[in-house]
Image (spheres, rainbow, N blue to C red):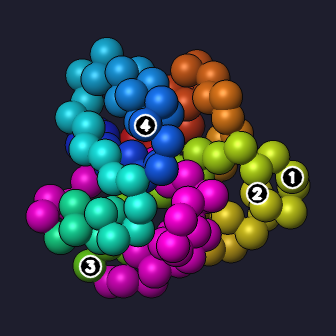
Amino acid sequence: MPIRKVLIVDDSKTELVYLSGLLQKQGMQVRTAENAEEAYRCLAQEKPDLILMDVVMPGQNGFQVTRTITRDPQYADVPIIMCTSKNQETDRVWGMRQGARGYITKPVDPAELQAKIEALN
């Protein structure tokens, strides 16, 4: 199933604008959320084909949100790519253990992001 609708969850407006621009240039529809509550609201309104998830956010962090989404039968099939400044191997392993299907560190390399998305198709 091609990825057309993407939900980006990040508390940084700069990152939201940057990532939205990258994905929209590839013809994807993008919705954004700045925290866990907004992310859950967006999910309830429209199920995306992919979620890009920041880790460091106020309230629930990205690891917690990823775990909640991937364990919900309604959304378990939505792939999540962690997109974070946390660049330690232990962070990557922990993110994957929470259910993420990919892990990219910031600053995001557009070619790496595209490759991760294509690998999910």
Instruction: Kindly report which numbered mark, 2 or 1, lies closer to the viewer in this rendering.
Output: 1
Q: Calculate the distance from the C-alpha at mark 4 to the C-alpha at mark 3.
A: 28 Å
User: 20 and 92: which one is in front?
Assistant: 20
Instruction: Read off the residue under disc 4.
Output: 13
The amino acid type, in three-letter code, at marker 3 is Gln
Residue 114 lies in the magenta stretch: no
* Element type where label 1 sits in the image: loop
Q: Calculate the distance from the C-alpha at mark 2 to the C-alpha at mark 3.
A: 25 Å
Residue 28 image position (x, y, % from top left): 25, 30
Magenta residues (range): 45-73
Label pair 4/1, CB-CB below 8 angstroms: no
The amino acid type, in three-letter code, at marker 1 is Gln
Q: Which mark is residue 62?
A: none
The amino acid type, in three-letter code, at marker 2 is Arg
Q: Considering only order in the chain, which callout, 1 or 4, is on the residue closer to the N terminus?
A: 4
Instruction: Read off the residue under disc 1.
Output: 88
Residue pictured at 36% horizontal, 83% vertical: 72
User: Which quarter of the image is occupied by the C terminus?
Assistant: top left
In the shown orientation, is residue 32 left or right of residue 100?
left
Residue pictured at 56% horizontal, 37% vertical: 116
Label pair 2/1, CB-CB below 8 angstroms: yes
In the shown orientation, is residue 33 left or right of residue 99?
left
Instruction: Read off the residue under disc 3.
Output: 74
